Image (cartoon, rainbow, N blue to C red):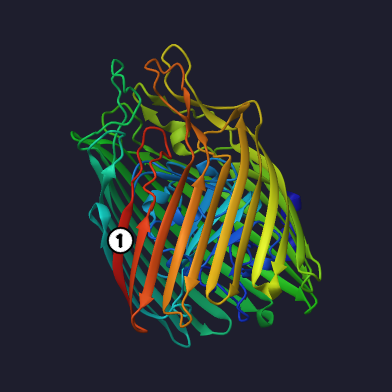
Amino acid sequence: MKPLVSLFALVAATPALAQSNPTLPTTDASGNDIVVTGSRSGDSVEVRNLPASVTLLTAADLEERQTRIVSDVLRDVPGVAVSRTGGVGGVTQVRLRGGESNHVLVLVDGIEASDPYQGEFDFGTLIADEAAKIEVLRGQQSSLYGSDAIGGVIQYITLTGREAPGILLRAEGGSFGTFAGGARVAGFSDTADYALSSSIYRTDGTPSAIGGSRNVGATSIGASAKLSWTPSDTFKLIGVGRYGYTDALTNDSDNDPASPLFGQTIDSPGVHSRSEAFYGLARAELSLADGRWTNALTGQFSDTTRENFTAAGLDFGDKGRRYKVTFETSYRFGDDRVAHRLTGAVDYEREEFQNTTPGGFAFNGRRSTTNWGFVGQYEVTVDDALSAGASVRQDENDRFEDVTTWRAQAGYRLPIGLRLRGAYGTGVKNPGYYELFGYSDGRYIGNPDLKPEKSEGWEAGVDQELAGGKGTIGVTYFDNRLKNEIYIAYPAPAFDATPLNRTTLSKQHGVELFASARPIPQIKFDLAYTYLKARENGVDEVRRPRHVASLNTTIFSTDQRFSGTLTVRYNGRQTDVTFTDPTYATSPLVELQEFVLVNLNAEYRLSDRLSLFGRIENLTDEDYQEIFSFAAAGRAAYGGVRARF
C-alpha cells in the first residue's frame, strides 16, 4: 500500500472509481463524436482516438430507430448479447464479450445503477428518454471502475439543456394495447443548464408461455432531472436525479413433478413483479492553473426495491442501497503536438442489502460491504497519430481480499487513415448478495465463502477511415480468461441450487466487426457483427450465440423532412439451460434456433414543430425464443405524433 500512496503524493492526484462527467456533449466543436466513459479524468475523448473498443449510439441513432426500450438498441452494438424473459418489462440481461450479465458495469448519467442485491442491472426497467445517448466500452475496465467491469461499461446519458434545448412531447399507441409517451423541457443561460424529462411505456402484452393465453403486460415509468450551475470559469455544480418504476406481469415455471410441462413456463394468474429505484448525484468541479488542473468531488446514491407477488400476496423481495463518495483530480501538461494527462482517484463505497422475503425462513436483517478504491491513470496523445494510456487500481474490501487490477492500451494512426490499436487488462467481480446470502426454501442456498471472479485478456484491432471521414470500418479480435467463475451446483442429497467457484478457467474469444457510413446526406447505414466462442468447463456458455449481427439503413429526403429506417437484427443459434429434471440432479441443455427480427419505421415532419411517425416491429412475424420456454411477441405496429417547441 505504501508505494501506491507515494505515487499519489508525487502526482498530487486523487480521483474517482466510476465517475464521469455526465454534462459533456456528444460531439466536439468540430463535430467529431466524443465519449466520457473511457477516461476517469472527467474529460471527453474522441471516439476515433480512444485506443479501446467503444461504440457511441447518438441521440440521432436512437430517434431514427424509434428506440423505446433501451436494451433493444443495444443489439446493434458489437460484442453485445441480450436476453429478455418474456415481454417488455421482463428481466433483461445484457452480456459483453461472452461474460455474465453481472460482469457489465452500468452507469446512468454517471450513477452506478446496478441493484446491490442482485449484483447486476436489469435493463427491463430502463425505457428510453427523449434526447439521450449510449456509450458502450468493451474489455476489462476494472482498473478504472473496480468490481463489475470485467466485460466492460455501458453508460446511458440524457442530453443537457445546451445540447438539446426546448420542449419535446411524444405520444404513440399501437398493438397489444400499447401506449407510450415522453416529455422533455430543457434550456440554458450563461451560467445555468437544465433538462427535465419523463417517459412512460404501458402495454397489455402477449402470452409469454408457449401455447398459453395469459397476456403479460407491463407499465414502466422513468423520470430524470439534470441541472448544472457555472458561476465562474473555474467552478461548476452538477445535480442529477432519476426515478424508475416497473410493474410487470410474469409467468412462473411448472413445479409439479408429475406434470409433462415440469420446468417450462405456464400461465400463472396473479404473478407479477414490481421494481422501484431512486438515484441521485451531486458533483462539484474546480478548475485551476488555467484549466490544466481540474478537481471534482462527487457523491451519489442508489436505492432499489424489488418485490415479486403471487395471487396470495408477496412471495419474495429485497432492498439494496449504494452510497459512494469520490474525489478525482487530473493534471494536463505538454503542447499542441504532445499532450499528457495524469489522473488519480480515491473512492469510498458502501453497499447495503436486506432480504424482505416473508415467512421467517430467510435472514431478514441487513448486511453491508465497504470498499475503498485507489486509481491512477496516465494518457498521452501525439499529433493525430499516437494515443496511449495505462491505469492501475487497488481495491480494499472489508469482505473480500484486496485486489489490484491494471490495463494498458495504445493506438497509432497512419497518414492513410488506418489505425492499429491494442490493449491488455485485468478485471474483478465480487459476488453479489444473492449469491452470498440468498435463500429460497428447497430451491436455492447462498454461499458466503465465494471468492471474487478474476479476468484477464487482450484485444487487437484495426480501423480504417473512408472517403475523408464519411465512413469507418473496423475489426477487433479479443481473448479473455476468467478464473473462479461462479456457477450453480446441485449437490446431493437435497440437490438445492448452490453457487460455487470453478477451479478451471473459462475462456472467451471472438471477433467484432463494424461499418458505419453516410456517403451522401440522403443515406446512412450502420453494420455490426460478432463472432463469439465462450466456453465454461469445456461447454458452450448458455445465452451466448456464436453469431450476432445487425444492419440499420436510414434514408432521408432531400429536404430532410422525411426519414425511414430499416433495421435487421440476426441472433444465431444458442444453448440455454432447462430445469426439466424433477429431481434437480441435472440441468439439461437445449438449443434455441436462430432468428431474424426486421423493424421498419418512418417519420415525416409536417412543420418545424410537428411530425408524424410510425413503425412495424418484427415485420416478418418471426416465431422465436430468446430464453427457453418463453414465447416472444409477434408482428406489431405503432404510430404517433411528436411536437417540438
Answer with the quarter of the image where residue 375 lies. bottom right
Near mark 1 (Cα within 10 A), the count class, few <14, some 14-19 or many ≥20, is some
Image height of 113 relative to 493, above or below: below
Residue at image position (28%, 20%) is 256
User: In the rendered image, is residue 387 in sight?
Assistant: no
Q: Where residue 224 appears, x then y in whole percent?
A: 37, 66
What residue is shown with label 1?
638
Q: Position of residue 264 (x, y in %)?
A: 34, 28
Q: Is residue 486 visible?
A: yes
Where's the C terminus, which quadrant? bottom left
Q: Decide: is 416 above or below 444.
A: below
- Camera-side residue of 106 and 566: 566
Q: Nearer the viewer, residue 264 or 45?
A: 264
| Residue 39: image location, x then y, percent | 64, 63
State left or right for residue 537 relative to residue 411: left
Q: Secondary structure at mark 1?
A: strand
Q: Based on the displayed image, in which of its 4 quarters is residue 581 positioned?
A: top left
Q: Nearer the viewer, residue 5 or 619?
A: 619
Q: Position of residue 544 (x, y in %)?
A: 54, 39
Amino acid type of disc 1? Answer: Tyr
Nearer the observer, 51 or 13: 51
Vertical position of residue 417 compared to residue 408: above or below: below
Q: Residue at x 68, y 58 (%)?
A: 474
Asked if residue 585 lies left or right of residue 361, the reply is: right
Q: Quadrant of residue 314?
A: top left
Q: Residue furthest left?
A: 312
Tally of numbered discs: 1
Left or right: residue 507 versus residue 284 is right
Q: For this view, does 262 lie left or right of residue 50?
A: left
